[in-house]
């Protein structure tokens, strides 16, 4: 079993304890930022690591607490914790959709939904409109893969009864 011989880094990551992924019990996501916390209780003479972590779920913000159950087994040290760092990627999204002649409401609703879904800053979204078709150009940063982002956008559109004409993400 592989392991790390240093503290978990406070960066966005997936974490495993004895190869079991740490999963949020509130939202089922598995991306955390772990913070090492110091425990006051000292047990002199006992060779146990008193490392504890509070990990914050990056999806819902709930905290999870766990220790480091690494230990010696027949003179061999068994590392319990593994950390897989996740990098945030930038994407450019271009999405066009049908709005009809006087339905600016759809543009506002869809734009607001995407701003909410992806935490987009206003300056990273550009709206244009031509002959019943609106087009949004958006810059986002995300931990997700293109396929996941595409599905999110399609689902949001469906919920608002919006028909997508074209969607490109790169
Ligand atoms: Zn969560």
Image (tube, rainbow, N blue to C red):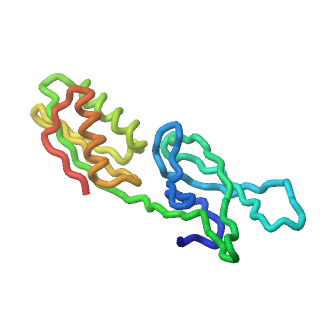
Locate residue 40 relative to residue 62 in the image: left or right: right
Q: Residue at x 27, y 40 (%)?
A: 153
Q: Residue extending furthest right?
A: 44
Q: Measured from the top left, where is residue 100 in percent x and y? A: 13, 26
Q: Residue at x 14, y 35 (%)?
A: 133
* Quarter of the rendering containing residue 127: top left
Give the answer, above or below, for where 161 lies relative to 4. Answer: above
Q: Which residue is nearer to you in this view: 107 or 154? A: 154
Q: Measured from the top left, where is residue 54 in percent x and y? A: 65, 50
Q: Measured from the top left, where is residue 97 in percent x and y? A: 17, 36
Q: Which residue is nearer to you in this view: 148 or 139? A: 148
Give the answer, above or below, for where 18 lies relative to 97. Answer: below
Q: Which residue is nearer to you in this view: 153 or 55? A: 55
Give the answer, above or below, for where 20 lies relative to 48. Answer: above
Locate residue 22 relative to residue 114 in the image: left or right: right
Give the answer, above or below, for where 77 lies relative to 87. Answer: below
Q: Residue extending furthest front?
A: 74
Q: Residue extending furthest bottom?
A: 75
Locate residue 43 relative to residue 34 in the image: left or right: right
Q: Measured from the top left, where is residue 27 in percent x and y? A: 48, 38
* Quarter of the rendering containing residue 77: bottom right
Q: Residue at x 84, y 54 (%)?
A: 40
Locate residue 28 relative to residue 78 in the image: left or right: left
Q: Tell me how many marks there are.
A: 0
Quarter occupied by the C terminus: bottom left
């Amino acid at each position: 079993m592989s392991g790390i011989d240093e503290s978990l880094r406070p960066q966005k990551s997936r974490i495993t304890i004895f190869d079991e992924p740490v999963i949020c019990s509130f939202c089922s996501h598995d991306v955390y930022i772990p913070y090492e916390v110091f425990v006051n209780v000292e047990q002199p003479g006992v060779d146990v690591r008193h490392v504890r972590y509070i990990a914050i779920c990056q999806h819902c913000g709930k905290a999870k607490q766990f220790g480091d159950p690494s230990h010696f087994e027949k003179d061999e040290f068994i590392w319990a914790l593994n950390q897989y760092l996740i990098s945030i990627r930038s994407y450019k999204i271009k999405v066009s959709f049908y709005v009809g002649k006087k339905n600016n409401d759809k543009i506002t609703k869809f734009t607001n939904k995407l701003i909410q879904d992806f935490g987009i800053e206003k300056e990273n979204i550009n709206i244009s409109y031509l002959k019943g078709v609106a087009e949004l150009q958006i810059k986002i940063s995300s931990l997700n893969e293109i396929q996941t982002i595409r599905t999110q956008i399609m689902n949001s559109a469906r919920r608002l009864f919006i028909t997508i004409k074209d969607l490109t993400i790169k």
